[in-house]
């Protein structure tokens, strides 16, 4: 996209596009560095180390306690996020980027269900419709693993791990919502993620550490940098638009990931991935935009 055209886009869309590109490049770095036999746990540890340093600087800049108030929830958010990240990174190393990213975007469905159960949030009709559409999309995506006439790009184990990653992300998001309702500072919430992820990944890594050469080490560093770019873009997008609209923009990451997979890894998405991914994204958008419409109607009725 020419720079002058990009600058004409609304600020929220520009920042979310930057965020989506950052996260897509992050997953591409994970896939690229795995070629050098760097264990997944080492990749997680490297990302956590960079994030821990940057998050610590951010918390200290605010001159607040790094430990927060609701420590059990903060640790729980860190554990859930870490397990999700481990699953997602493993998935990226064994699945094409497009498929891995599409399945990850099932997390809004899991989040809606978990929020209903644990946060007692109301279930809108649009949420139910979104769940049905997204699950239909999942069925289309996984068709190659159960239909012997279609050559699959991934194994059932990889699929299960990807679903676990999406579910773990949903658990983390629900805990973040709970912490936000308790007025826990956002920077502290972010800080606890790498604070938990670093020791967990190092323990699970054990004696499997591989000393990276210059290029893999550079990829590990850029993994952390692209993650930070993604986080910054996401934060700024949320400030420019309401959460519903900003989240809707984030689905361009699927396009970025598919393009990166095609250009750098010779990955061509299956037609089932394209069709199923479209349904999953439509379902997520129905949920996000339906919530925005519901809030507008409620606000209008209150006047």
Image (cartoon, rainbow, N blue to C red):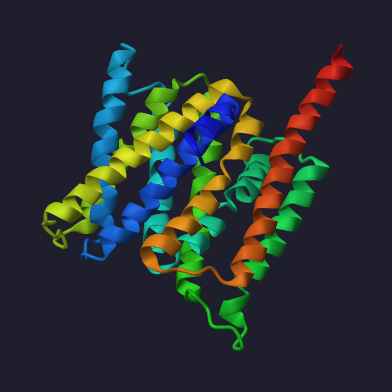
Q: Residue at x 11, y 56 (%)?
A: 213
Q: Residue at x 47, y 76 (%)?
A: 155
* Figure quadrant of residue 206: bottom left
- Asked whether the viewer can see residue 167, the reply is no
* Figure quadrant of residue 127: top right
Toward the bottom, the furthest residue is 149
In the rendered view, tell whether residue 84 sits above or below residue 193.
Answer: below
* Figure quadrant of residue 193: top left
In the rendered view, tell whether residue 203 sits above or below residue 270.
Answer: above
Which percent across, then down, holds residue 217? Answer: 17, 50
In the rendered view, tell whether residue 58 sits above or below residue 37.
Answer: above
| Number of dots carrying numbers | 0
Left or right: residue 79 versus residue 235 is left
| Of the pair 190 and 261, the residue shown nearer to us | 261
Left or right: residue 248 versus residue 38 is right
**Quadrant that contains the C terminus:** top right
Q: Residue at x 56, y 38 (%)?
A: 174
Which percent across, then down, holds residue 6? Answer: 53, 33
Left or right: residue 74 versus residue 268 is left
| Of the pair 132 and 3, the residue shown nearer to us | 3
Which percent across, then down, holds residue 190? Answer: 39, 31
Which percent across, then down, holds residue 135? Answer: 69, 60
In the rendered view, tell whether residue 116 sits above or below residue 12.
Answer: below
Q: Residue at x 46, y 72 (%)?
A: 157
Left or right: residue 79 versus residue 105 is left
- Asked whether the viewer can see residue 174, the reply is yes
């Amino acid at each position: 996209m020419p720079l002058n055209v990009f600058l004409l886009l609304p600020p929220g869309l520009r920042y979310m596009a930057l965020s989506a590109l950052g996260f897509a490049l992050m997953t591409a770095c994970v896939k690229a560095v795995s070629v050098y036999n760097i264990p997944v746990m080492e990749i997680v540890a490297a990302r956590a180390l960079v994030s821990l340093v940057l998050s610590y600087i951010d918390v200290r800049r605010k001159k607040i306690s790094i430990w927060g108030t609701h420590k059990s929830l903060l640790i729980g958010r860190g554990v859930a996020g870490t397990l999700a990240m481990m699953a997602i990174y493993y998935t990226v190393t064994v699945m094409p980027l497009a498929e891995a990213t599409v399945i990850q975007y099932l997390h809004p469905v899991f989040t809606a269900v978990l929020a209903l159960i644990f946060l007692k949030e109301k279930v809108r009709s649009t949420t139910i419709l979104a769940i049905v559409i997204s699950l239909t999309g999942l069925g289309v995506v996984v068709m190659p693993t159960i239909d012997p006439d279609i050559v699959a790009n991934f194994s059932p184990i990889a699929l299960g791990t990807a679903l676990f990653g999406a579910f773990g992300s949903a658990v983390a998001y629900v805990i973040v919502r709970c912490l936000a309702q308790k007025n826990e500072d956002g920077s502290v919430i972010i800080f606890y993620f790498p604070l938990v992820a670093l020791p967990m990944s190092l323990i699970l890594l054990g004696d499997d550490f591989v000393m990276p050469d210059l290029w893999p080490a550079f990829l590990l560093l850029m993994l952390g940098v692209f993650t930070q770019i993604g986080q910054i873009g996401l934060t700024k997008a949320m400030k420019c638009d309401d959460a519903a609209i900003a989240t809707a923009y984030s689905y361009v990451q699927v396009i970025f990931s598919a393009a990166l997979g095609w250009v750098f890894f010779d990955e061509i998405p299956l037609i089932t991935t394209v069709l199923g991914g479209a349904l999953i994204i439509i379902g997520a958008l129905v949920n996000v935009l339906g919530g925005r419409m519901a809030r507008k109607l409620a606000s209008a009725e209150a006047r």
